Image: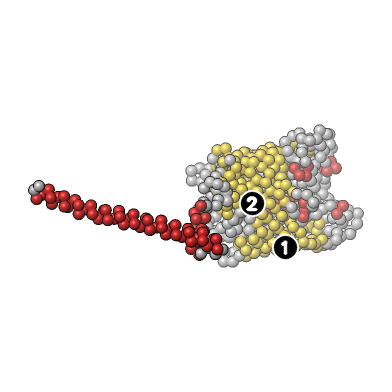
Amino acid sequence: MTVRPVLILAAVLLALAPIARADDADDLRREMGELRERLAEQERRLRELVGHAPTQDEIAAAVERYIGSIPDAVLVGGAVAQGKAGFPLGKRPFIAEGPNRLEIGFRNQVRYEAFLYGDDARANLTTTDRPKDRSGFELETLILDLQGTVFCPDLSYRLMLNFDSDSGSGVEKRWAYLDWRYAGDHHVRAGQQKVVYGFEGPASAATLMFVDRNLVTTAFNLNYDTGVCLWGTFGDAREPKRFRYAFEALNGEGRADVVGSVFADATDKFSDQLLYAGMFEWNLTGKDWAWDEVDHRSCEARGRLDASLGASAYFENDDDTNLPPGVPGSLAVKGNGGVGPLERWGANAWFRAQWQGFSLQTEYYRRSLDFTDGSTAPDQVDQGAYVQLHHRFASSNWGVGAKYATIWADDDYYRGVLKDRVSEYGVVVNYFFWDHSNKVSLDVSRVVGNGGVSATGPGYLVSATKGVVVEDGWMLRLQWQINF
């Protein structure tokens, strides 16, 4: 054997020696670890036999094993990663999983209100007796509002129930619909919904300047009905929501919980003709903005002028004698003994704008009732208009507003004690703890010569059986609202 092979063999043996030693060391450590585990297990069993408690190390190890055996997170919305839930400050609590979403809304309006009658108020049509002043606390709205999406983001639903004082022992059913966004921002909605007549009527009562809707809106507003609606927005590349539209075909009988099913009666109690209504709004300044009567925008956005011009109308050939409460509007039908059949139509226009904390809105209404089926009663044509202005101060939570509203009732029917000119003017002071979500409002209004508008929500009362045929005096309303 030469010297070179010997040297190569020696180098290989030296290189393998540490590996062999490392393997021996690993085996020794593994054997020692197994021995310690066997001794620890024997010690644990011995303690159990003599009744000793587990050590802190054993407790900690058991907890670690338990934590390692459960999932990293518990999903409220379901057993998939998309599930989530929350309750953001000032907003609605929600539960969501994939495309399914449920939002739980709540509104409570606790109100003290008083109507102090003046000398021109009348308790009846035959004497000069004044009505008794009325006052007290009430739950004006106590609403549970469930809405969200199901199956896909384009299919939405809503159910709003009102448990307020006006509902008595029952439950007032408001919104109750399904909505499908079939293309872009174009929708078809089916169920109970507001009639798209006017601006302030279809707007949410939670977003008003004053405690409630004014006398003119109350007189002509058509409230809720059941049917279908095509609605949406469109525009151009710069402002894709420059225009808003809605077209409805409805039963024309009012809320379902008031009149019941129109399909469950064959005595001609309900009209077999539909009520058709439509609205169109043009955002003059381009940008789509909220149907909100108060400018709650941030300081950066308050300098932008938002302004819109809108119009709406409705028509129905109401071929039955029955006129449910609030149909057609809260201004009383005087012709033909207050019943149908009749053809009715209404037209409306509005303007609204917001800038630097100021909110301005004004509307005009006209209603025509043509009594048919051989009736000789003259047509009843009533009109009304109002203007409201509110300012939300940027440096504080305060807001102040003023309004003026007037109705020109048909003088063929409103004459003598029942004035054909009804007016209301008033002021409001608001304190916004958290915008409309938490606010207190003080509203003082002067009502002059109201002999036809009656609605329990806003507080107007004209009813001979309840001791008022002409309202004239001061109405005071103090309200605390929580809304999300």
Tell me the element at label 1. Answer: strand
Q: Which residue is mark 2?
A: 104
Picture residue at 68% right of the left edge, 51% below the top:
144
Picture residue at 8% right of the left edge, 48% below the top:
2
The residue at the far right in this view is: 126
Picture residue at 54% right of the left edge, 40% below the top:
184
Q: Is residue 258 left or right of residue 301?
A: right
Against 460, is 57 above or below? Answer: below
Look at label 2 and name its amino acid. Ile
Q: Is residue 417 left or right of residue 153?
A: right
Say few, some or many: other residues with alpha carbon within 10 Å of mark 1 (under 14 / 14 to 19 / 20 or more): many
Q: Quadrant of residue 241?
A: top right
Tell me the element at label 2. Answer: strand
Look at label 1 and name its amino acid. Leu
Q: Which residue is mark 1?
A: 478
Image location of residue 289, percent across then percent down: 57, 51
Image location of residue 306, percent across then percent down: 56, 53
Task: Judge whether residue 417 can be spotted in this image.
Answer: no
The residue at the far bottom in this view is: 396
Q: Quadrant of residue 141?
A: bottom right
Task: Judge whether residue 470 can be spotted in this image.
Answer: yes
Against 262, is 173 above or below? Answer: below
Q: Nearer the viewer, residue 263 or 53?
A: 53
Q: Is residue 286 left or right of residue 274?
A: left
The disc, 1 or 2, on the residue closer to the chain's N-terminal end is 2
Q: Nearer the viewer, residue 135 or 68?
A: 68
